Image (cartoon, rainbow, N blue to C red):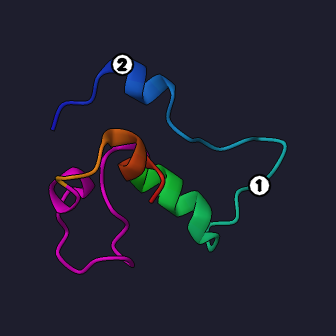
Amino acid sequence: MGIDKQTLEQAPGFDKDNRTDMADQSWGTRVYCHYGYKPYWETNTGERASDVADKENRKDVERW
């Protein structure tokens, strides 16, 4: 899967001054949804969020 430069530049990341809590599901959800996937803990299919929610627009997919 190719990722465009803008998507990578806007991706959630780590803040060197504030450690990320890797157990924080909201942070993990933001990362998954940024790349268009529904988090594995919300589905067991491994499908792209856009495929699972084909009737929803992109903004709704990003809220997962």
The magenta region covers 34-53
What residue do we see at 36% from left, 18% from top?
5
> Which residue: 28% across, 77% down?
43
Q: Is residue 47 part of the magenta span, yes or no?
A: yes
Q: CA distance from mark 1 to mark 2?
A: 25 Å
Foreground of the two, 21 or 39: 39
Q: Quadrant of residue 21?
A: bottom right
Please, which residue is most extreme toward the top here?
Answer: 5
Residue extending farthest right: 17
Query: What secondary structure is found at the residue carrying circle 1?
Result: loop
Dividing the image into 4 quarters, which one contains the C terminus?
bottom left
Residue type, label 2: Lys
**Residue drawn 65% across and 44% down?**
14
Q: Nearer the viewer, residue 20 or 28?
A: 28
* Position of residue 28 measured from the top left corner of the image (x, y, whole percent): 52, 61
Q: Is residue 26 above or below residue 14?
A: below
Residue 19: give its label.
1
Q: Position of residue 47 (x, y in %)?
A: 17, 63
What amino acid is at disc 1? Answer: Arg
Look at the numbered disc 2 and give the secondary structure of its residue. Answer: helix
Q: Position of residue 51 (x, y in %)?
A: 15, 55
Residues packed near mark 1 inside 10 Å, few (<14), some (14 to 19) or many (20 plus): few
Question: Which mark is on residue 5?
Answer: 2
Q: Earlier in the sequence, mark 1 or mark 2?
A: 2
Which secondary structure type mostly characterizes the magenta part of the structure?
loop
Of badges 1 and 2, the one in the foreground is: 2
Q: Quadrant of the N terminus?
A: top left
Q: Is residue 55 left or right of residue 33?
A: left
